Image: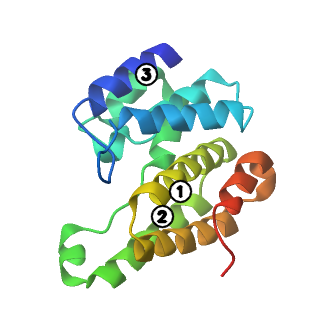
Amino acid sequence: MLHRALKYAYRQHKKQDRDGEAPLPYLTHVTDVVNKLRYFGGETDEEVLAVAMLHDVLEETEATEAEIRERFGDRVADLVVELTREEPSEEVAALLPPDELYELRSQLLLDGIARMSPPAMRVKLADRLSNLEGARATRPEAKLRQYEAQSRRLLDRIPRDVCPELWDRVRALVPAE
């Protein structure tokens, strides 16, 4: 299943790159999340590892929930849906100044995390660890501080006992306020 998820993620993210100067192909992020979940988080459930590989396909590509459900089954699809970020409508987003839009998007993210199952939370921790490491290399200082503040709030929503090693690694990258 993980091999199929890798091939599917490759096809979906094929023409996408990460942020920053000299960006890496997007697939490097999802494979990094799988590696962090497996080697730091100790995850061996192949379905959860496949979810890590697919965690961004619904929000970043043309993939559909039905397609994921058909290819990978109900559990994988349900977890990918849990990890898919809710976004404000285009109408609402157009009316808000950038700082207010960021705060609304953050609140939607945090509300979604509060409803996640433990396996989805573990994937989210691996995702945040990968994103924080990338942000340190690519984001301007002010944006990095904003992302770190959001990460502190994320850790407030995810109990440490969901995955202590990943939780601690995220915490280590987020300076105290």
Q: Amino acid at mark 1?
A: Leu
Q: Position of residue 22 (x, y in %)?
A: 29, 45
Coordinates of residue 3 in the picture (x, y in percent): 48, 14
Q: Is residue 17 above or below residue 138?
A: above
User: Which residue position is annotated with label 3?
Assistant: 6
Helix, strand or loop for disc 3: helix
Whichever of callouts 1 and 2 sits on the residue coming sooner in the sequence is 2
The residue indicated by pointer 2 is: 109
Say whether residue 107 is visible: no
Q: Residues within 10 Å of mark 2 (few under 14, many from 20)?
A: some
* Label 3, residues with CA under 10 Å away: few <14, some 14-19, many ≥20: some
* Separation (CA) of disc 2 from disc 3: 25 Å
**Secondary structure found at label 1:** helix
Residue 61: where, in percent of width, then height? 27, 39
Q: Does the CB distance between marks 1 and 3 fall below 8 Å? A: no
**Residue at 28% in and 24% down:** 11
